[in-house]
Image: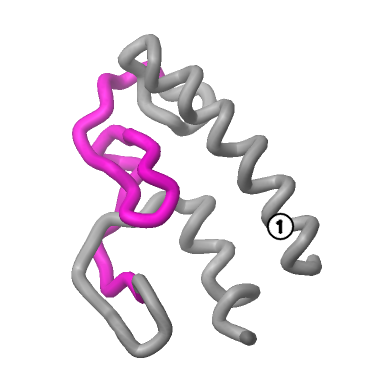
Amino acid sequence: MRKKEDVIQHFAYQAVVGERNATQRCGQERCDIQPEGECSKCRGLFCASHVKEQDVVMRVGTTTRGSICAHCNKRRKLWARG
C-alpha cells in the first residue's frame, strides 16, 4: 500500500471511529463497550481491549509511552519507511 492510499483509508477510519465515539461506544467495529482510553495517533476512543500501551513514535527520533489502536499500529511499518 502506498502512503496516499493509506491516508485516504485513515481518514475514512477516523470518521467511523468518530461516529461510534459520538454514541459513547468503542471505536472498534462491533464493540459496544464504553471507551476507556484514547489512541495516541488517531485520537479515537477505545475500550481497554482495543488499545495497547507501548512505545509510540510521535516525531522522527521522539518516542514516548502511549496507547495505540490496532489500526494505527498496523500503519507504523508503512510510515517508518520514510
Point out the residue furthest to the front here.
59
Residue 16 locus on image (x, y percent): 57, 27
Up the image or down, 60 lies above or below 20; here it is below
Up the image or down, 36 lies above or below 20; here it is below
Foreground residue among 70 and 45: 45
- Which quarter of the picture shows residue 45? top left
Q: What is the tally of numbered marks visible in this picture?
A: 1
Horizontal side, residue 16 vs residue 37: left or right: right
Foreground residue among 32 and 20: 20
Which element carries disc 1, helix, strand or loop?
Answer: helix
Foreground residue among 48 and 72: 72
Residue 14 locus on image (x, y percent): 54, 37
Q: What stretch of residues is rendered in magenta? A: 32-57
**The C terminus, quarter of image:** bottom right
Give the residue type at disc 1. Asp
Q: Residue at x 30, y 41 (%)?
A: 49
Residue hosting label 1? 6
**The N terminus, quarter of image:** bottom right
Query: Is 50 part of what is drawn in magenta?
Result: yes
Q: Residue at x 20, y 33 (%)?
A: 36
Residue 19 locus on image (x, y percent): 50, 18
Q: Residue at x 38, y 21 (%)?
A: 21
Residue 56 locus on image (x, y percent): 32, 71
Horizontal side, residue 20 vs residue 11: left or right: left
Q: Residue at x 33, y 35 (%)?
A: 46
Up the image or down, 50 lies above or below 26; here it is below
- Which quarter of the picture shows residue 22? top left
